[in-house]
Image (tube, rainbow, N blue to C red):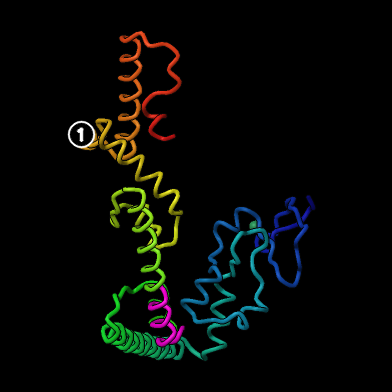
Amino acid sequence: MTKSYCESCKNEFYINLEKYDENLHIILCKKCRNIKPVYIKSHCKNNFLLRDNDLKNVKYIYGLANKCYLRDDINNIVLNKYGSINNFLKYVDIYNKKNEQRKLKKEEIKNERRKYIQNLFVENKLEYNEIGDIFMFIETGKPSPIDIINNEIIKLDEEMTRRVQLSMHLNELGLYYDELFKPCENYIKHKKGSMCNITENIKFNTFLKNNTEYTKLLDDHSENSAEELAIMKFVDKNKKKRSKQKIKNIKSCAFLDFNS
Ligand SMILES: [Zn+2]
């Protein structure tokens, strides 16, 4: 801590001056910091249309998280820059109009791109979703529509290959193939998981449906809790059955047999 004094009320106080630079900072005591009218930097930029260059030589209050300039200093800069308040207001008006026009133009360009890419998708009989590359093209004009269409066709071909492979694989195992089953959909559409995982998932799901109360429990529970409850009930039921029959040395319950 260093003994210093407030540049406004001249009162002496102690302050940490580690990052102080006399060319950049104004030192104010706590009391003056609370009463001095100031503008934060973003306000100066947004409301007075000042740029970094306009503010580079203006001192700001030392020790605050945001750069805060004294209101009088900023008012002087605005007056110097625009000549008068009237000029400044005229400038703001022109700036706002130009800004509005820029926004409209941007929106117009985006609508043209949207129409163009939509038509291209219809012509190529592809499903149109305004996400990923399509969204980027509308916003920025890149990637090129030809690349987007080609990638979409490649993606659909790959999906078809995975679809055929998966359905054949499940067919060989005598398992029912349902594309709406989440793991199948994830594998085909998003390359997530593996055929091995899906097989295990379908086996487990078939077990839940055929050997437990899972389907009934879904009426009152979420998928996860229905699954948990169904397994608990199944294990419990099998334990009781075994103890009734006084069967000893059973290596595993039906649930484990099923998964082996
Ligand atoms: Zn003070």
Task: Measuring from the top left, give residue 260's x and y in whole percent.
Answer: 44, 34
- x then y, percent, for residue 143: 46, 83
* Nearest to the observer: residue 229 or residue 111: 229
Q: Residue furthest right?
A: 2
Span highlighted in magenta in the image = 141-155
Q: Left of 222 or right of it: where is 78?
A: right
Residue closer to the observer: 207 or 71: 207
Instruction: Tell me which image quadrant ligand 1 sits in.
Output: bottom right
Among the 4 quarters of the image, the one containing residue 63: bottom right
Main secondary structure type of the part rendered in magenta: helix
Q: Which residue is pictured at 56% across the width and 63% down the height?
A: 36
Residue ID at (63%, 83%): 53
The number of discs equals 1
Q: Position of residue 219 (x, y in %)?
A: 20, 37
**Quarter of the image where one finds residue 8:** bottom right
Numbered disc 1: secondary structure: helix
Q: Which residue is mark 1?
A: 216
Q: Is residue 100 visible?
A: no
Is 142 contained in the magenta span?
yes
Q: Does the magenta run of residues contain 103?
A: no
